[in-house]
Image: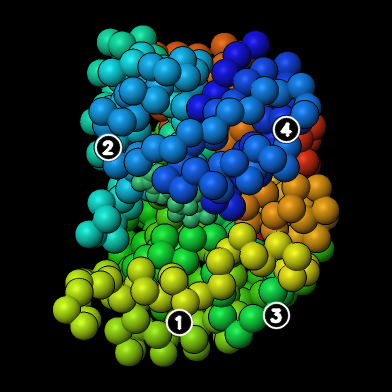
Amino acid sequence: MGKALIIGAGGVASVVVHKCCQNPDVFEEICIASRTVSKCDALKAKLDGGKTKITTAQVNADNVPELIALIEKVKPDIVINVALPYQDLTIMDACLATKVDYVDTANYEPEDTAKFEYKWQWAYRERFKEAGITALLGSGFDPGVTSVFSAYAQKHYFDEIHSIDILDANAGDHGYPFATNFNPEINIREVTANGSYFDNGKFIETEPMSIKRVYDFPQIGPKDIYLLHHEEMESLALNIKGIKKIRFWMTFSQNYLTHLKVLENVGMTSIEPIEFEGKQIVPLQFLKAVLPDPSSLGPRTKGKTNIGCIFQGVKDGKPLTYYVYNVCDHQECYKEVGSQAISYTTGVPAMIGASMVMTGKWKRPGVFNIEEFDPDPFMDALNKFGLPWHEDFAPALID
Ligand SMILES: NC(=O)c1ccc[n+]([C@@H]2O[C@H](COP(=O)([O-])OP(=O)(O)OC[C@H]3O[C@@H](n4cnc5c(N)ncnc54)[C@H](OP(=O)(O)O)[C@@H]3O)[C@@H](O)[C@H]2O)c1
């Protein structure tokens, strides 16, 4: 069918590459391009020889002219951005200049301000529409699958959804005292930011980790969950009819939180540059350099993730509750693609989102959040490509 340019060669990109190669009818050809080309070449070496033709390239995705030159050379049908959120706008600029479709998994964040909002990417709506190209935002798991779950619940089960609780549990154990499951800089910026939830038309801010509950997850058991701000709440608040309340919950162990608190207290999670031995360094970037590389966690991580959504609302005038979730086993993921479940649960939906646009099922000019498209073909593809989902119409609720 066509060709994808994959930007980034980290944990998530590795899964995207594996999954594109499992879907060669759509991805006849892929080019893996990143800052460090040796990482792209290593991925190619691992997967070469199948039906999907693989090439590699070096690119600095902060540089628009470099990106344009690469896109003009490769001539892809779509660009899959699995670099970092800092590169979203430069890659969107290059897609606009070359009239190529775009997909990502995380919303833009300026490097010097830890604040995730869609306003920067939504500002591209008219230009993408005029150029006749599609930008699909947030095609990972959360955002991504959680948003598709919401569209599916709205389409098939509810007249109105009144509340959504998004529940993200990772019961994996990597055996290190402290490590993050994806890019440590992005991860720590996310969990040290203020929390927030949507309540009757507005967002209420909370102190980081100040709201805690315990939830008994299917196939995992009881875990401490903490309320966080998460980007999909911003678009779901606009796109889900009748919605009154949205909360996002993530599991953290006491051990993780204690380490994080100490690092925060001594200034290691700060993104303010400091002078060190005559050089400017950002403490959080230095911390990233000393923490275990998330891609090295694959062989060590045991246990499962469970990510899903509990919806409450009405159907035919009667109250209805619906829970839909996926359970993913770290070791099974490692056996299949050489990565742990956090990269797997992000990389599979990124490939599926790109295939939705490439096959024309989700091809529409403009900039869209993932819940704005028909969820059905995506839900089918989740079952086919390794992220099967389960339903429960009488789940335990969170107060
Ligand atoms: N929606 C979700 O569910 C979800 C979940 C987890 C992660 N994510 C997102 O997925 C993305 C990838 O995460 P990851 O864990 O794979 O991160 P990662 O392992 O750190 O990989 C990032 C990759 O991007 C490359 N890169 C960084 N800056 C670049 C630049 N200026 N030009 C070209 N390449 C550049 C890096 O190159 P080097 O190797 O040279 O550093 C690296 O290969 C992030 O945006 C993250 O927020 C989404």
Task: Residue 63: give its label.
Answer: 2
Nearer the observer: mark 3 or 4; the answer is: 4
Determine contact: label 2, label 1, CB under 8 Å: no
Task: State the image coordinates of residue 340 (x, y, percent, origin top left).
Answer: 70, 58
Give the alpha-carbon distance from disc 2 to disc 3, as whole Å: 38 Å
Q: Earlier in the sequence, mark 4 or mark 2?
A: 4
| Amino acid on which disc 3 is placed | Gly
Q: Earlier in the sequence, mark 3 or mark 1?
A: 3
Query: What kind of element bears circle 1?
Result: helix
Which residue is found at the position 66% from the left and 67% from the top? Answer: 297
Taking 79 as reference, is 82 above or below it? below
Which residue is found at the position 50% from the left and 88% from the top? Answer: 258
| Amino acid on which disc 2 is placed | Asn
Give the alpha-carbon distance from disc 1 to disc 4, as whole Å: 40 Å
Q: Earlier in the sequence, mark 2 or mark 1?
A: 2
Q: Earlier in the sequence, mark 1 or mark 4?
A: 4
Query: What kind of element bears circle 4?
Result: loop
What residue did someone put label 1 on? 260
The response on whether ligand 1 sits within 8 Å of label 2 is yes
Give the alpha-carbon distance from disc 3 to disc 1, as whole Å: 17 Å
What residue did someone put label 4 on? 48
Is residue 130 left or right of 357 when viewed as pictured? left
Q: Earlier in the sequence, mark 3 or mark 4?
A: 4
Front residue of 116/69: it is 69
Front residue of 349/224: it is 349
Residue 274, picture quadrant: bottom left
Residue 170, picture quadrant: bottom right
At label 2, counting other C-alpha atoms closer than 10 Å, the crowd grade (few under 14, some 14-19, many 20 or more) is few
What residue did someone put label 3 on? 175
